[in-house]
Image (cartoon, rainbow, N blue to C red):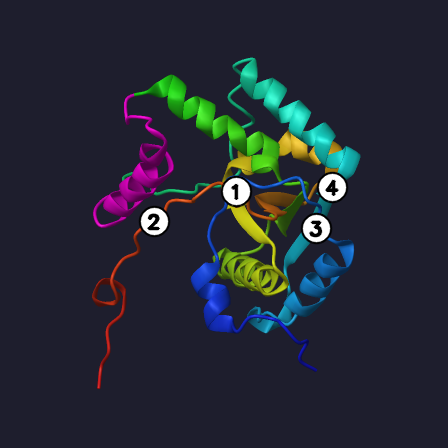
Amino acid sequence: MTRAGLMDVYSAVRTRQSIRRFTDRPVPREALERVLTAAVQAPSGSNLQPGSVYVLSGEPLARLKKAVAGRAAAGDSGDGREFANLPPELCPPYLDRMAALGEGIYGSRGVARGDVAGRARIRAENWNCFGAGTALFCYLDRDMPAPRWADIGIHLQTVMLLLRAEGPHSCAQEIWAGYHRSVAEVIAPPPHRTLVCGLSIGFADPAWAPPRIRRAPLSETVTFLD
């Protein structure tokens, strides 16, 4: 049954952005439950549905924000990721695309490439979930092979698009995996699971204009063989 007023899927894709400034308006629990209930329909290999999701708000999220922000401010570089998120050597076109992201995030705020302190200051905004009052943390069993990581991506994208249909925005944050022990102290996941990423969820601050990160043209990523 279609709920009146929901945006179509093309609009959801077009308006989905990684929002890095949220208002303090809470996301209704009912909306989150609708989104996560519908998102279980996301496909996964052999129907394993390998992801485990934890949703934090209120005191647990405030405690996590304080703990990690404190560690980072004290110069603690984190626990180290339990998985590689980039290849040892990043070559074009991937290097160029990552540079475009950096220019969008830092350059749009007047922070130059060599401004280490400025970049650290902006990066630290992650630990407050950019002001969002809800955050989702996604885990995967450690023994799951590479294709099951794709299942996590499919599920998270489904969640992000459904959030847009409901109204809220989100921002996926791999950076949380670097402080996975602090996250585990709040969530207490089973020891056989590893933290993949976090996802900040909230309503975008209308006073902030997020930079549009340019995407690769179709000719670079798609080949039609007729």
Q: Secondary structure at mark 3?
A: loop
Q: Is residue 65 above or below residue 206?
A: above
Instruction: Estimate the spatial distance between the alpha carbons at disc 2 and disc 3, rounded to whole Å.
Output: 26 Å
What is the CA distance from the residue labelled 4 to the residue labelled 1?
16 Å
Q: Please name the amino acid that badge 2 sits on.
A: Ile
To which residue does mark 2 refer? 213
**Image location (x, y in percent) of residue 22:** 58, 41
Judging by the rendered image, the residue that carries numbered circle 3 is 27
Whichever of labels 4 and 1 marks the residue nearer the N terminus, that label is 4
Visible in this render: residue 166?
yes
Q: Nearer the viewer, mark 3 or mark 1?
A: 3
User: As shown in the figure, which amino acid type bears the numbered disc 1?
Assistant: Gln
Mark 3 neighbour density, 10 Å: few (under 14) some (14–19) many (20 or more):
many
Which percent across, then down, holds residue 72?
A: 55, 20
For label 4, the residue is 57
Is residue 103 in the magenta section? yes
Precedes in sequence: disc 3 or disc 1: 3
Q: Nearer the viewer, residue 207 or 173?
A: 207
Where is residue 183, by image quadrant?
top right
> How far from the left and from the top, in percent, is residue 50?
63, 60
Q: Nearer the viewer, residue 22 or 49?
A: 22
User: First in sequence: mark 4 or mark 2?
Assistant: 4
As measured in the structure, the alpha-carbon distance from the residue carrying label 3 to the one carrying label 1 is 18 Å
Residue of label 1 = 173
Of badges 4 and 3, the one in the foreground is: 3
Q: Is residue 197 above or below residue 9?
A: above
